[in-house]
Image (cartoon, coloured by chain):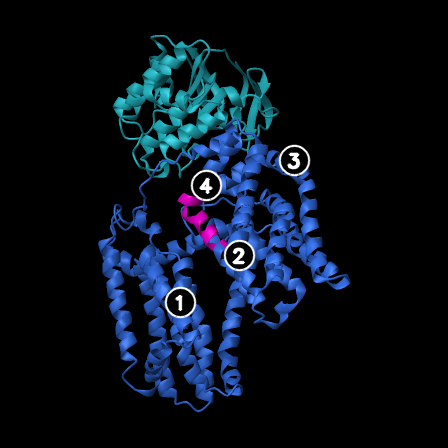
Chain colours: A cyan, B blue
Amino acid sequence: MIQVNNLSKTYNNNVKVLNITNLDIPKGQSFGLVGNNGAGKTTFFSLLLDLIQPSTGYIKNNGIQVNTSEAWKPFTSAFIDESFLIGYLTAEEYFYFIGDLRNQNKADVDALLKKHEEFFNGEILNSKKYLRDLSKGNMKKVGIIATLIGNPEVVILDEPFANLDPTTVNRLKKIIKELADNPEVTVLVSSHDLVHTVEVCNRIVALNKGEVVKDIETSPETLKELEAFFAV
Amino acid sequence: MFKHFIRLEWKSFFRSASFGTNVVLKVFMGLIALYFISMFLLLGFVIYPILEDSGLNPFTTVNKFLIYYFVVDLVIRYFLQKMPVMNIRPLLTLPIKRNTIVHFSLGKTAISFFNLLHAFFFIPFSIMLILNDHSVVTVILWHLGVFSIIYMNNFINILLNNKDSVFYSVLAVVVGCGVAQYYKVFDVTTYTAPFFEGLYNTSYLFLLPVLAVVAFYYFAFNFFKSNLNLDEGLAKKSEEAKTENFNWLNQFGTLGTFLKNDIRLLKRNKRSRTTVIMSVVFLFYGLLFFTNSIEVYRNPMFQIFAGIFVSGGFLFTFGQFVPSWDSAYYQLMMSQNIQYREYISSKWWLMVIGTAIATLLASFYLYFGVHTYLLIVVGAIFNIGVNSHLVMLGGAFVKTPIDLSTSKQAFGDKQAFNVKTMLIAIPKLLLPMAVYSLGYYIFSPNIGLLFVALAGILGFAFRNFVFSKIEKIYKTEKYATIAAYKQKN
C-alpha cells in the first residue's frame, strides 16, 4: 500500500532528520513506528501526508506519489496533533464537517459516533464546549475518532496513546486492533510506548536519528528485543 | 529579583516572533512609533499658538476637552494595550513571592508606550505654558495631576480588561455625552473643565488624582493578586458552546460545508468579530466625505473612494487574510480531500454577502441624495467584481498566522506586511478613482458612475481566471505556508 523510495529530509542547517532507503508497507498491515524524541516519526508522517517536502525520494500511497498528485486524500485519514482540530467548532460540528468532506451524510457519522460512544466517556458529545476548551486527552479522542469517518483505507495516528487515561488507552487499543483486523485497512501508529505498540501492531519499525534500525514482525519475543535495544 | 525579570523582558522583546521576522517590518514599526511621537511633540508645541490665534484661551480650551482626551485614551488602551498576564504563568511555581510578581507585572505596564506617548504632548505643552507667563509651580502641579490621571487610566484598563459589558456601557455614556455636547443639549465639560482648571488654580486639588492613582494601583494589585491562579485570572476564558447545523446551507454542497464553517468562524472568535465591528466602522467612514465637512474630500475622486470603503469594509478586512483565517488548522485542510475551488468560492461568497449587507445598511446615505447612495452602490459592484478578486489574490501571499482568540492583533502590530500584497492593493482604490474621474470630467457624474459599474461587471469575466491563479498560488506555496502557520507568536 505504501512504498518509500530513497526518502530523505534535510533542513537548511544540513541536519538530516530522516533517511529511509526502502520501506514497503503492504495493504492491511498494522504498522508501528517507535523511536526516541527526534527520531523522525512525525517527520515521516508529515512527508506521507505531503505537509512537508522531501529533500530526495518519494512516497507512494496506493501507487499515487503523494507530492505530485492529491488523489490519495480521499482514502487516507490522519491525526497528527491538535492543529488537526478546528478550535471554534463543537465536537459534533467537527465530525459533520469531516463527514461532509468525506462524502458521508449525517446518518453515517451519527452511526459511527454511536458505535464509539463508550470511547468518549460521556465527556465530549453534547458537552457544550468548543474543541479549543477541551482537555488535551479529550481533544485527542475527537481527533482519533474523526480519522475513522468515511471508511479510510489508510489511517495514520501520531502518538495516539499519549495524554490518554489508562481506560481510554485500552479502549483505543481495541479500536486499533479492530482496524488492523480489517484486511482493507492499513494502520500506521507511532509511539514512545513499546508495550502498547507491540500489542496492536503486527510489524514494528524502530527509527533512530532518522534511520531505520529495526524492522521486525511482532512475535512473543519482540517486546524483549525492543526493550533491549532502547535500554540505557 | 527584579534584575532577572528585566532580563526576561528584554529577551522576550527582542526574541518575539514579530520582532525577529523581518527587517522591513522592524523599520516600519519603528517609523510608525516615530511618527506618533513626532505628531504628539508637534501638537504639544503648536496647539498653544494655534488656539491663541483663533481667539481662544489655549489653557482653558485644552482643559475643556481634556475629559475626552482621557476617555479616548482609555478606549485605545482597552483595544490595544496588552495585559501583562499570560507570561507570568511559568513564574508561579518558582520560589518568588506573589507580591513581587504582581508588583513587577503592574510596574511593567507603567513604562508602556501608551503612557510614555502622552509625555510627548504634555511636556512641550507645559513648556509653552511656562513660556507664556504661566507660573512654573502651578504648571507643574497641573502636570502632576494630568499624569496621575493617565496612570489611573492605565490601572483602570487592567481592572476593565475583558469586561466587555462594563466597557461598552461606559463607552455608550461617553459617546452620548459627546453627541449631547455637539447638539448643545448638555455639556459635560462645564462640569469637568473646572476640575482641570482647579489642578492649576489651587495648590491642593492635584492631590486628588495622585491619591486616585495610588488607590487604583492598590485595587489593581489586589485584583491581580487574588486572581493569580490558573483557574481564575490566568485561565483562558471559555464560553458555552451551542451546536449550530445551518442545515439550510446543505443545498449548496461542498460550498455550503465551507460557508457553515466560515459563519461559525466569524461568530465565535474574538479576532474575526473585530473584523465585523471594523466593517461597521467603515460604514460610517463615508460621513466624513459626504457631509462636506472636509474641503479636500469634496473632490469627485474622493467621493468614489468613500463609496468603495463604505460598502467594502468587510471585504477588505476579511479578504486580506484568506487563507490565514484557517491557519490554526491548515494542516488538517491540506490533508483532507478539499477542493480548492470550492474553498475559495466559499470565501468569495462570504465577501459578496458582507458587501451586499453593508450596501443595504448604507441606505441611510440616501439622506445625502440619490447620487451619494449610487456612489456606494457602484462602489459595491466594483468591490464584488474586481476588488474581491484582488483582495484574495493579495491574501494568498500573506503567510501570517492568525491567532483567532485575541483581538489585539487586529490593528496591525505585526500585520502582514508584504511587498506583493502592497502592489496588489494599489489598483483596489486607484482604479475606480481613475475610472470615475475619467467619466466625470469628460462626460458627467452619472457617466462616471456607469464607468465604475461597468469596470466592476467586467471584473466578473476574469473570475475563473483569477480563481485558477489563486489556486495555483495555494498549491505552489503550500509547504511554505504550512511552515509559516506553524510558527506560533
Respond whether the residues carrying marks 2 and 1 are from the same subunit. yes
Element carrying mark 3: helix
Depth check, front residue: B188 or B37:
B188
Provide the chain ID for the residue under circle 2: B
Respond whether the residues carrying marks 3 and 1 are from the same subunit. yes
Q: Is residue B390 above or below residue A86?
A: below
Depth check, front residue: A44 or A119:
A119
Q: Residue at x 30, y 27 (%)?
A: A164
Q: Residue at x 35, y 23 (%)?
A: A113
Depth check, front residue: B348 or B381:
B381
Q: Is residue B96 above or below residue A231?
A: below
Element carrying mark 1: helix
Q: Sequence-wise, which precedes: disc 3 or disc 1? A: 1
Which residue is identified by label 2? B362
Give amino acid for label 4.
Answer: Ile
Q: Sequence-wise, which precedes: disc 3 or disc 4? A: 4
Q: Are marks 4 and 1 in contact (CB under 8 Å)?
A: no
Where is residue A34? Give x, y as percent: 41, 21
Hey, which quadrant is residue B426 in on the image?
bottom right
Q: Sequence-wise, which precedes: disc 4 or disc 2? A: 4
Which residue is identified by label 4? B263
Q: Few, some or many C-alpha atoms within 10 Å of disc 2 (few <14, some 14-19, many ≥20)? A: many
Element carrying mark 4: helix
Give amino acid for label 3.
Answer: Ser
Q: Which mark is residue A224?
A: none
Is A161 magenta? The answer is no
Q: Find the distance from the CA under tag 2 to the CA under tag 1.
A: 21 Å
Respond whether the residues carrying marks 2 and 3 are from the same subunit. yes
Which residue is identified by label 3? B468
